[in-house]
Image (cartoon, rainbow, N blue to C red):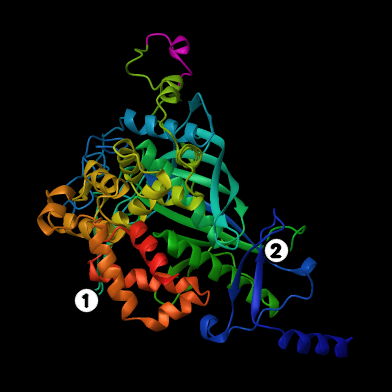
Amino acid sequence: MAASSIAASKLLHNMNKHVTILCPKASCVIRRICTTSSRWHSQPQLRAKSALQQLVGVVGLEIHAQINSNTKLFSGSAVHFSAPPNSLVSFFDGSLPGTLPVLNKRCVEAAVMTGLALNCTINRKSYFDRKHYFYADLPAGYQITQQRRPIAVDGMLTYSLLGGKKRSEVIRKSVKIKQIQLEQDSGKSLHDDVRSQTLIDLNRAGVGLMELVMEPDMSCGEEAAAAVRELQLILQALGTCQGNMSEGQLRVDANVSVHRPGEPLGVRTEVKNINSVRYLARAIDYEIQRQISVLQRGGTVQNETRAYDSKSGETIPMRDKEGLQDYRFMPEPNLPPLIVPEDNTSLPAGIDACQAVVVQKIREGLPELPSVKRDRLVETYGILPEHSFTLVNEDGLVEYFEAVLKATKKEPRKVIGWVTNELLGHLKQQDMSVSQSPISPPALAELLELQETGHISSSVAKQVFQEMWRSSGKTAQQIIREQNLELVSDTAQLHSICQKVVDTHPDEVHAIRNGNKKVLNKLMGLVQKETKGRADPVLVRAILQEKTS
């Protein structure tokens, strides 16, 4: 028995240094992750004896989305990210005796709207509870949340991944939403290591949050990142959360475990407060690899809270969770049950319809959601799926693209290149949003029309685009006229230039006459160089073909 164990160990030791993470609910391999010593810091190499024994990742998410509201959840204090410390704190936020919570209607509307967009069941009656724990930036010693009966339950988020050899195949997946609950945010602790003290800023205390709990239906960082990005786009489309992760408006906690398919789930760890979609994918993939490594060498995964260090690319322990914390939940005595009627006919007696949050009214006002928009763009304009992702992922880019199409006869497949490559490339270079573009949709449409109708070549069009970007306000027509960039279509002039190119490049001409037709493109390039890109390419090709035949 010992001999076979040693042999198996040697066999595992000599296998290549890769671990394949499988998706439990699909037969496809999601990604291959290298576990070389340089990346995983000399952790024991991971091996699998067979597909049946392969350890796979299991990922669930808890997401805190800051509600896009002018005031806090239970007080009239304003919400502003960069305000001076402790300048937006009401008596209630500071937990002064005798103060009472007043529920913000906007926050309830946001939660209902988000629940509907995520296919949740909206509870007609939900309750608020106190969750007790002591922390310096929680003045009351408890948080008002919804533990017993949250506002929305049993939803589904459908998200998409680009797969296939060229990452052009759309793979649709879904994750169940267990619940959405309303709750308060806490304040912020600022640690001063120089003076060995901690300062408290209560501006964030009491800001309205939606906590979304996703079931462990994902298997790797790529899936979790795609789900969070889709959620972010949905919240931004709804206007219920701005979703700026760098400002803490969307914070993600990942619950990660590993197990063998068909066996019970393993011990999970929680990776807290990840504030970037890219870091989320990296943190989850690292944690899956770390747990597999621990189990493969005979260790035990600890039930603990960890943090992700973006510099080292590792998760690091924060505290263990073996001792179950007693939050001493109790009903919030100062808030009645939250009633959300389905329509005006089911309003409670004595309640004004203007003061109530009515589900049907919110359902009717839901905007076009990102997945629907992507499908529409592909179906309507015949663009590639990856282009639809680019358009939808960038705020305002779909509207820009469609505005250009309305003002030009150019095919959508040709316009999309200009919008996603030229325009978006310049915006990214200068860290600008679509709304800040110096080239408006009508201005770009005018440029594309001039190219489409043969007034300028494609190379000149790009040159004019650059000039329009630098000289905001100048039209394409003005730039072309000022710099004399119109297409040269004079046959005699082009014959003369082509003849000159043919006479000075006998080797290329000989190659063309021997059947190498691709060399003709080189001669065309030389003619364009002579004319500074102004020669009519169709006419030039015809002339060169005649002279080299």
Q: Which mark is residue 259?
A: 2
Query: Foreground residue, 456 or 141?
Result: 456
Query: Which image quadrant for residue 411?
Result: top left
Task: Assign the C terminus to one quadrant of the image.
Answer: bottom left
Q: Is residue 150 above or below residue 194?
A: above
Count of numbered circles in the view:
2
- Tell me the magenta residue range: 340-350
Residue that appears at 52% across and 77% down: 514
Q: Is residue 135 above or below residue 502?
A: above
Q: Earlier in the sequence, mark 2 or mark 1?
A: 1
Please name the amino acid that badge 1 sits on.
Val
- Name the side, left or right, on which 484 lies relative to 292: left
Label 2: which secondary element = strand
Q: Which mark is residue 333?
A: none
Label 1: which secondary element = loop
- Using a 10 Å C-alpha cutoff, classify the residue at mark 2 as few (fewer than 14 neighbours), some (14 to 19) or many (20 or more): some
Task: Assign the N terminus to one quadrant of the image.
Answer: bottom right
Q: Is residue 134 above or below residue 77?
A: below
Q: Quickly name the residue at label 1.
A: 194
Q: Main secondary structure of the magenta part?
A: loop
Residue that appears at 50% across and 23% down: 124
For the question of whether residue 472 can be seen, the reply is: no
- Name the side, left or right, on which 189 lies relative to 158: left
Q: CA distance from mark 2 to mark 1?
A: 44 Å
The extreme left residue here reads 482
Residue that appears at 57% across and 41% down: 178
- As for residue 335 lying within the magenta part, the answer is no
For the question of whether residue 252 can be seen, the reply is: yes
The extreme right residue here reads 1
- Name the side, left or right, on which 504 lies relative to 163: left
Query: Which image quadrant for residue 441?
Result: top left
